[in-house]
Amino acid sequence: MTGTGTGRLFLRHLGVTVRNRTAVLIAGLTPVMLLVCWFAFLRDGLVDAAGTTGTTNSAPAAAAITAWVFATVAVLTGFSSTFAVLLAYADDRADGRFCLWAAAGAKGWQVGGTFLAAAATVAFALSLVVIALGQVWAAVRGEPTMSAIDWLLALIGSLLAAVFFAGLNGLAVALTRTRGGLAGWALLGGLGTTFLTTSLALVRPTVVYEVLGALPFFQASSLVRAPILEGCGVHSLTYPLGAEIRAGGTWPLGLVAVALLAWTAVAWALSLWRMGRTLRDPA
């Protein structure tokens, strides 16, 4: 298959996602539901419970919580939207379309790579929408907003997070053969990602914090969250009993990016390998 054929596959996957109502609901409604839950049930409680802010903060507690909420939802949107796009992979496998692509001369890396690229593209776009909404909200309320440099760092972080989640969900979908298995992964993977991207940001650094912080979930969230919060004048927000909302982890962002790229390379390599096997042996 030529480069033109690869491009057509990529566009085909994007088109299938748009026409798939389930994928649209998962990708589009997830950030909406998360934002509604945060603002309706959690945000006010976090603001009311806040103690003193860190000395480097220039934003009030309410602005800090709002920026943190939008940054966190942007990360979680990356997980849900990549999974939604990759549902088309499961449908194509069940429909026997892989046999047609193999007969047309498509390589396993072309089919798998275009699926992963489409998933990362959708996730990146939706994450940017969430970040932009957060900045509009802050501007309307007269709260600090990000500078151009902060926007650039947030864009890079969102892209790296989207690419990682595409590889992670690609591997999970390629290994799962049943609808029940996919539903289970969506539930367990979603809950695990939510825990690792939010709970770790609410505790002070400890040995457990450092170990879990070395995992790619928290690294992805740090790359997105840090420029958004620090760009809005927030470094940390301290709560009673030692809880603390932090812009990022204890690693420098450059090191976090390198570590996440390493995790991403592993996830993509395993995903492409498994997807290639599926193309050669769809049964």
Image (cartoon, rainbow, N blue to C red):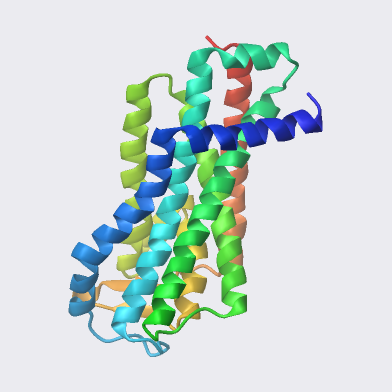
Of residues 92 and 11, the one nearer the viewer is 11
> In terms of image quadrants, where is residue 149?
bottom right
Number of marks: 0
Q: Position of residue 10 (x, y in %)?
A: 66, 35
Q: Is residue 95 left or right of residue 29?
A: right
Q: Determine the residue positioned at 52% across, 18% down.
A: 93
Q: Position of residue 69 (x, y in %)?
A: 35, 66
| Outermost residue toward the front in this view | 19
Q: Is residue 154 left or right of residue 9?
A: left
Compared to 92, does 34 lie above or below? below
Whether residue 263 is visible, yes or no, is no
Compared to 132, does 230 lie above or below? below
Q: Is residue 120 left or right of residue 229?
A: right
> In terms of image quadrants, where is residue 238?
bottom left
Compared to 130, does 65 lie above or below? below
Compared to 112, does 206 lie above or below? below
> In terms of image quadrants, where is residue 202?
bottom left
